[in-house]
Image (tube, helix red, strand yellow):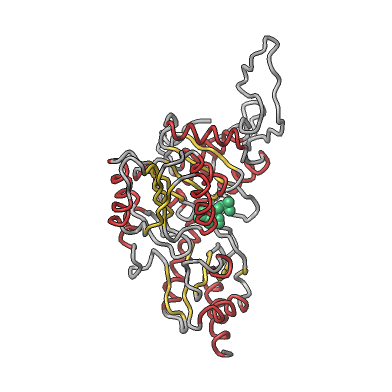
Amino acid sequence: MTSNKQAGLSIQTRVAQALGFIDEQTKGLVPPIYSSTTYLRDADNHYRSGLIYSRDDNPTYRVVEAVLADIESGAEAMLFASGMAAAVSVFQALRPGDHVVAPKVMYWALRNWLIEFSHNWGVAIDFVNTSDLDAIASALQPGKTKLIWLETPANPMWHIADIRAIAEQAQAHGIRVVVDSTVATPVLCRPIELGADIVMHSATKYLNGHSDVIAGALITADKNDEFWLRVRKIRRQAGAVLSPHDAVQLLRGMRTLVLRVRTSCESAMYLAEQLQQTDHVVEVLYPGLPSFVGHAVAVQQMEGGFGGMVSIRVRGGAKAAIDIAARTQLWKRATSLGGVESLIEHRASIEGEDTPVPNDLLRLSVGIEDPCELLEDLQQAIQAAHSES
Ligand code: PLP
């Protein structure tokens, strides 16, 4: 495998060719799947292959992790069995007594897990508005705060956090910054280039892109960082590892990442603009709209688009929102995001009673279908729901 980055190739070329991977043994263009769980020891009791047991030693990961590290401008990557497994491994690397700052509105399942984990593990967490630099600064506890967790754009209101400014604050206090960049993808934003220490992905979403693999990833700026080494140990010991079959399937999806993300971004922008002028839509939340709080920061740190995720708030509250979702034909009523097919979801229903998400909000994951057809379908559903209410 060559490092094409040094050769100045674009992310589109690097990812499409999996960094120019050719299997040395067969000259195959696609990496083999190593399904063996265990490896032969040398007669003199050494393991010169470097491979012992594939609960994190699986060579299938190498190409996939190399591509991820390359496109995120990182030093090293690790695959996990899910996005949650990747995120959880970061928090498990903290020690009792450590303090964490995390967003008030973020991927809900991780937020819920964090609340319980922090009690059980003796880690203190402050959930703050991470779009507000002053709120972050006042939450920091010198000597105690070890981690700032960011998600940008953040589910499902798409709040933007200023990664560069926050990383500067954090570095001054020796605090690590970890960014859930699932929604932005490395096509639009590379947090390590902005000063983050670790990037996290639910690779289930855009990286794979076809709603058929659950996977997670972490990418570090420094592979010798002792915190990263602790996370690596957690993957090895706790064993939340990806199946080698899924790793290869993920790589297949990643090859078209740039095309899919660009198409979704263009369609999301079009839909956001059109929906702003649609009757019964009270608010459109999309970082690409000049009226969106956080747009200016998004312009600075995202390049080539603002993502494929849009949320709308509709007149008539939860009842109207659920009714609209029920009347769509092309949009599929399903959770998750980042696949080629467009999804619609009433977020408050899945997040439960203590959600900070307004109950009139519909989350739209814009896929790669014809954007005019997507708009028409949504508009007919909105009109029909309101004409019968
Ligand atoms: N982070 C974000 C932003 C997500 O949307 C999700 C899943 O929806 C996760 C993390 C968790 O990833 P997974 O479902 O792969 O465990």
Q: Quadrant of residue 39?
A: top right
The residue furthest bottom is 388
> x, y (%) of residue 324?
57, 79
With respect to residue 24, does 136 lie above or below?
below
Classify residue 142 as left or right of residue 324. Answer: left
> x, y (%) of residue 261?
49, 56
> x, y (%) of residue 84?
56, 49
| Residue nearer the viewer, 319 or 29 | 319
> Is any part of residue 296 visible from this angle?
yes
The residue furthest top is 44
Numbered marks: total: 0
Classify residue 348 as left or right of residue 47. Answer: left
> Is any part of residue 260 visible from this angle?
no
With respect to residue 216, does 229 lie above or below?
above
The residue located at (37%, 54%) in the rendering is: 302
| Residue nearer the viewer, 231 or 50 | 231
Instruction: For the C terminus, give its image quadrant.
Output: bottom right
Q: Quadrant of residue 38?
A: top right
With respect to residue 60, does 260 lie above or below?
below
The residue located at (67%, 34%) in the rendering is: 32
The residue located at (44%, 65%) in the rendering is: 157
With respect to residue 152, does 170 lie above or below?
above
Q: Ligand 1, what quadrant?
A: bottom right
> x, y (%) of residue 289?
37, 68
